[in-house]
Amino acid sequence: MNLYNIYKITVIFMSDRFKYNLRIFIIFGILFELMTVFYNPYAMKFLERIGGDEFDFSLVNSTKGIIMIFTTLPAAFIINKIVDKQKVTAIVVLSMAVIIMSMFFVPMLPANYQVISFIAILTLLMIPISIYNISYQNITGEIFPQRRARVLSKRSIYTIIFTTTVTITSGLIFKYFAQENSEFILIYRIFYIIAFLFGLIAFFVFMKLDYTPTKSIEPIKIKGSFKKVFKNKRFTKFALSSTIFHFGWQMGWPLFSIYTIKTLGADEFWLSLITVGSAIAMLFSLRIWPKLIERYGNEKIAYICTFGMAITPILYVISKSLIVLVIFASLSGVFTSGTITVLFSDMLEVVPEKNRIIYVGYYNVLTSITLAISPFVGHYFYEQKGIIYALIITTVFRLLGGLAFMVRERSERKYKLRSEDSSL
């Protein structure tokens, strides 16, 4: 057999393996997102129905960040030493499903303990989520070393189609099958059981990925790892820009819930419409962003998308009715999909293959720190000046994030030009 035939067989094998993994990757993505969609979009509304207030909305987001700060990096070093990262990730998904299932029992507790118990469960859920994020991102980078933006886009397109259908259905269920608060609570409890079942199936599907475990030849040790990681200038510039943006991005999360639920009085049906509208916009735009990323690069698209996301709080401010909010929230989904895609793609591009998971761990710690702080900053402005003022301040912080990505892109472009000139 000559070298050409060996090369041809290898290409066919790699192509078949790529297609197989892409199919499993998409199926898992659908199942995982369906598990999420049965509890996450309505989490704040459920919290309100059991007695939660505006402070609890901000507390939920901040405690998530605090937990991730202390769990992400240790998890990264531990997982980096484990050969079979696929099995670890699958077990983490299963543990997430079990914790979500525990929400079923919250309404059975005494009324005084329901709010704090639900917040505690959401906080506890962040432990497996933080581990899942770094492990899943690392495996994605290994299985799909090329065409990541297109892979992530295709996965998102399929997951959005399924989650949108389920979200519409769940919204209609709330609208037509629940009148009293107790009836709404019963539907939530049924949804938590369904979420657990999807998580269970996702566990088995993820184990079917054709993944060959790899182990770092020279794994980074905890001592001195910070200095080694942030010696990488490309990673440092990206991490700094993304951290600044995440502060403004996460600052708006509880404020959007407060404005939508408390100010405009949205129920589960309206929340489903907002989610669906945004998802539809994301579905169409996901066909465009990967092509733009491949054409113009991650750096340029990153600042375009983050600048675009800066207008979202302003769109909320000028939305004086739920119908208008549904329309504007849908439009914001265009830039949200681009931001999610490009930040993931950009991160995987700037981190080296060796010890990738440690770099991802440090990056996630930075964004977790902002998540622990920014919701309380937003709540402070809300308490002092009101929801409109707080949303406007959020826009300012998001604009700073977009500006940071723009400065980074200009810096990278100048560096490449100098490198080209020096080589002549």
Image (spheres, helix red, strand yellow):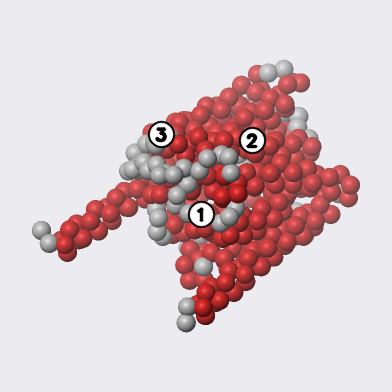
The N terminus sits in image quarter = bottom left
Label 1: how many residues lie within 10 Å, few (<14), some (14-19) or many (20+)?
many
Label 3: how many residues lie within 10 Å, few (<14), some (14-19) or many (20+)?
some
Lower position in the chain sequence, tag 3 or tag 2: 2
Quadrant of residue 307 in the image? bottom right
Lower position in the chain sequence, tag 2 or tag 1: 2
Query: In the image, which disc is placed on residue 248?
Result: none
Q: Closest to the observer: 24 or 160?
A: 24
**Dot in front, 3 or 2:** 2
The secondary element bearing badge 2 is classed as helix
Q: Which residue is mark 1?
A: 351
Image-based side of 58 in relation to 125, left or right: right
Residues under numbered marks 2 and 1 in contact, where contact means CB atoms less than 8 Å apart = no
* Label 3 – label 1 distance at C-alpha: 23 Å
Q: Which residue is mark 3?
A: 87
Image-based side of 339 in relation to 6, left or right: right
